[in-house]
Image: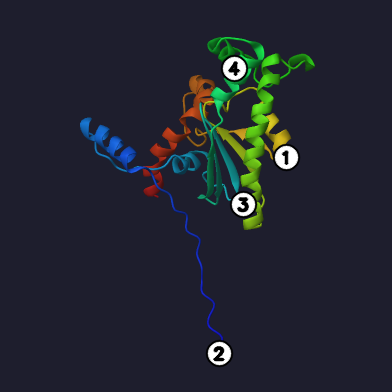
Amino acid sequence: MQPKARKTQEVFLTAAPKDLVQRYSSVIERLNLRLVALEIESFPLFRSLLGGESRPVFLVDIGAHATSFSIVDRGYLRLNQSIDLGGASLTTAVTQKLGLASDEAEKRKRADGLSSPGGAESPASAAMKPVLRDIVERSQSLRRLYEQKSKQQIAKVVLIGGGANMKGLPAFWSEVSGLPAEVGNPWKGIRVPAVLSEHLRILGPSFAVAVGLALREFEQSR
């Protein structure tokens, strides 16, 4: 008689540094507020950006000094990884290539982005593309790992964080990765004054975590 096959279940473990949790708790206590919950950023992010999405999605959070990759499938975080490249790395590339001061390089980065008006690529764009290509190619390693293991294809890339609004970034990411890419919109499904819609669209990638945390109570009350 052969032994029965054991049932298995995947478990995703996550943790936060104890001293960081204590610091947040201490601040809340000093403000005479009641701490309801603590979450790592990935969970509020896909709550605000990917609600109702049933396909595997690649979430890319471009911060100042790091970029975080998360793969979310049917509302669950499957894989997560961070690399030490971000918006500051792009500014440094422009500084070194064009010989500009850091603040001037930051302005050029924001003004030029990756777009090529009239077909001519700007010097700032040319300086940033190798760094961005490196970021995209590193994300591809995590993508391949997930697709091989799960036998599922990633549906799209959602870009968030302070660097997500760079001109031409979704098109560049799509060109290098072969996946459709878009800037995340945490305000979808939330009614906002029409006069603020464009301003909130620009701020959206930076407010995805805050919106996701606010939606937590609504999610639990369903």
Badge 2, how many Cα within 10 Å: few under 14, some, many 20+? few
Secondary structure at numbered mark 2? loop
Q: Nearer the viewer, mark 1 or mark 2?
A: 2
Quadrant of residue 170 within the rendered picture: top right
- Nearer-N-terminus badge (1/3): 3
Q: Is residue 196 above or below residue 187?
A: above
Give the amino acid type for the residue marked by disc 2 in the picture: Met
Residues at marks 4 and 1, CA–CA distance in whole angstroms: 25 Å
Is 108 drawn above or below residue 33 in the view shown? above
Residue at 63% in and 57% down: 149
Of mark 3 and mark 4, the one earlier in the sequence is 4
- Element type where label 3 sits in the image: helix
Q: Calculate the distance from the C-alpha at mark 1 to the C-alpha at mark 3.
A: 16 Å
Kind of residue sitting beneath label 4: Arg
Residue at horizontal 61%, vertical 17%?
109
Position of the N terminus by quadrant = bottom right
Separation of marks 1 and 2 at Cα, in angstroms: 50 Å
Tell which circle, 1 or 2, labels the residue nearer the N-terminal end. 2
The answer to whether the residues at label 2 and label 4 have Cβ atoms under 8 Å apart is no
- Label 4 sits on a secondary structure element that is helix
Q: Is residue 50 left or right of residue 133?
A: left
What residue would you read off at disc 3?
146
Name the spot of residue 26 as percent of width and height, x first. Answer: 25, 35
The label on residue 178 is 1
